[in-house]
Amino acid sequence: MKLNDLQTTTRWTLAGRAGKMNPSVIREILKVTERPGIISFAGGLPSPKTFPVSEFRFACEKVLRDDGPAALQYAASEGYGPLREMVAAMLPWNVDPARVLITTGSQQGLDLVAKVLIDTGSRILVETPTYLGALQAFTPMEPKVVSVASDAEGVDVDDLAAKAAATATSGAARFLYVLPNFQNPTGRTMTEARRAALSRRAAEIGLPLVEDNPYGDLWFDAPPPAPLTARDPEGCIYLGSFSKVLAPGLRLGFIVAPKAVHPKLLQAKQAADLHSPGFNQRMVAEVMKDGFLDRHVPTIRALYKSQRDAMLVALKREMQGLDVQWNTPDGGMFLWVRLPQGMTAIELLPKAVEKGVAFVPGAPFYAGEADPRCLRLSFVTATVEQIDTGIGALAAAIRAMGSQG
Amino acid sequence: MKLNDLQTTTRWTLAGRAGKMNPSVIREILKVTERPGIISFAGGLPSPKTFPVSEFRFACEKVLRDDGPAALQYAASEGYGPLREMVAAMLPWNVDPARVLITTGSQQGLDLVAKVLIDTGSRILVETPTYLGALQAFTPMEPKVVSVASDAEGVDVDDLAAKAAATATSGAARFLYVLPNFQNPTGRTMTEARRAALSRRAAEIGLPLVEDNPYGDLWFDAPPPAPLTARDPEGCIYLGSFSKVLAPGLRLGFIVAPKAVHPKLLQAKQAADLHSPGFNQRMVAEVMKDGFLDRHVPTIRALYKSQRDAMLVALKREMQGLDVQWNTPDGGMFLWVRLPQGMTAIELLPKAVEKGVAFVPGAPFYAGEADPRCLRLSFVTATVEQIDTGIGALAAAIRAMGSQG
């Protein structure tokens, strides 16, 4: 190494928070699974069959023809007015469009929430397990993340109250981050009874809720219970996304926030990227007008339900005789699997990839102690035929690993 | 106020940094100037005449027809490969495409730099005055911002060295943020001699540079000197933008960063919004291929030069007999004006708006003590006729204010 190299590589002092950032485990896994021939249940990628490409073609052409210069100019940080009104109108409680902030995907919503609500060392609460992307968004603000006990119906309300309370060394928790519908990673849905209990208890103890709802529209047989935010709009921040009902590649989501927080989220948004692309916002508004989602989303539901069903059938057939458990999600994109005792998902992964199938181990989704036997399967990216083959390969890998151990 | 209101408004505890965020002064001014009939020199909006709308129409159609599902799917955080290669190829030094990170406008580049390099209380250095948007992006990470003495050629290198050094109470400055070409707000350009001196001194004292170059292509008679990053790529982070050469509404920019920083910027990017819109990136790559910018950018230069000239002519004519000074920018979008002694830009603004013209006072652009007599005029948004009328109105407001005082 030349002296000059040494000087230049040591010139940069990174912020403390940079040491806490890590490459996404999922990202690294996805690289492996991009090898040809691998059937991937790993990514959280919506099925491209559901992207309304021809509607977007018409919308692009119309926006650029009728409104090109405005669509391509700098714009307000709040977002495109008509789109904010559509968002307010489609939510199942009384939402003032002035409280809607359009974000660059709902991932940015999480980044803004972190900036505005988290001080270094302040406690925030999450489900067990929780969405990995949220942990990544919160980490740079250096919170102490506390995992709240959770079961198939959602968070344990008593454990929540205990962990929310101020302690000798720190103030009350800043918020609970919760994804009640078809959760990523588990696919589970918070029941009506649990929502009611959580909402009541949070209000009693003064705990703010950050409710993330990217999958809520993707229900199979019946809509999920009303959002937590609908029960207490001033006590909740609500995050939504167009990624799963239209397309992720446009990077558009939204935040609905109470009066106490909205102006600061807006200022943070302005500092973060000035505004989300105005062109994309107009495209989405153009596609959505005249009730397009009412016709389009049922087709996504039907497709994903058929893929979930195919995965359930394949699991039942292929996992016979193996002590493997899984749940039956009522919507969304993911199913949660628990391996036999003594087996870990991290160890299984390379064996499964050898057999031609990939998944995401559950461990990275835990803020606290992980259950190493759990893994996440996406049923929306692979075809029904690939699901059949892939679950067979997964069972073969489990069987082979069990006979070794 | 009902008890319930009180409870809900006090439930939210904001992060300390949220108290330091403020609504943009410029934003508030722009609201005033949106009144019909006001000629605005306030906004930093590129002329919509320069947006290649028909090229975008063709590009949208082609991308959605040939590559729709991929363009609309989730994508890599680094950005679209072919666009990263185009960025590397168009920069005037040897850039590895692997070091290019596509961002959601260069504003996001500033946000990521702040996250990765600023700890609470760490010192960062800026020019006097400096770009307000950068101050807004850095503020949430709570740095101590130190203003380095600057003249018409750029930062004072001796003052820089003094202020960069570690002090009894803090470590060495983390970086100097510098906008060398046609600076926002002053329009000034750092000379070759100053760049050489700055680059040498920064390397000697081990001070990293963050070089922002959104306007560099918009030169009028001759290109500006080579970027600071070209002289020392491992000692500099370089920020670029497509907003001024194509269109801001797509929100696309890029960062080129040294090996010591790139991986952390990438992780911060992933946490911030997963990736910039893949659809927009493909549109821009499609428009840019076959050397479109080589044909298009000269037309922007010619237009902006004619508008700068119109403003210079109007200033010379209208400001006769008033002790008003201004500079002659060699490119970009802005011109810097200094009012007569005893007059402040903040006080002048409402009088100017009464006469039908708006500008941005200079004070918000100073991290340290402001020169209250300075103001920024954009010459790119208004037409030549509006520039004539608007500068006349501005002179009338100055004259009226002078005779009052």
Image (cartoon, coloured by chain):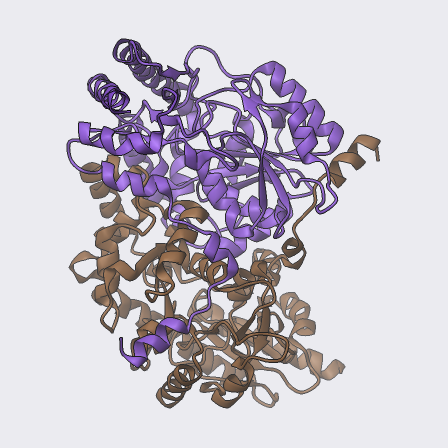
Chain colours: A purple, B brown
Quarter of the image that includes the N terminus of chain B: top right
Q: Residue A216: in sight, yes or no? A: yes
Question: Residue, x 69% and y 79% (percent of image)?
Answer: B400
Q: Is residue B399 left or right of residue A226?
A: right
- Across and down, in percent, residue B378 comes to 48, 70
Callout count: 0
Q: Residue A285: in sight, yes or no? A: no
Given residues B362 and B127, the one toward you in this image is: B127
Given residues A9 and B113, the one toward you in this image is: A9
Quarter of the image that includes the C terminus of chain B: bottom right
Q: Is residue B172 left or right of residue A355?
A: right
Question: Residue, x 60% and y 80% (percent of image)?
Answer: B167
Question: Residue, x 48% and y 37% (percent of image)?
Answer: A83
- Across and down, in percent, residue A287 comes to 38, 31
Query: Vertically, is B144 above or below B269?
Result: below
Given residues A78 and A324, the one toward you in this image is: A324
Q: Is residue A169 left or right of residue A47?
A: right
Given residues A119 and A375, the one toward you in this image is: A375
- Across and down, in percent, residue B276 comes to 36, 48
- Across and down, in percent, residue B230 comes to 30, 76
Query: Vertically, is B217 above or below A398?
Result: below
Q: Quadrant of residue B383?
A: bottom left
Question: Which residue occupies the extreme front position in the image?
Answer: A405
Q: Is residue B232 left or right of residue A271?
A: left
Query: Vertically, is B233 above or below A35?
Result: below
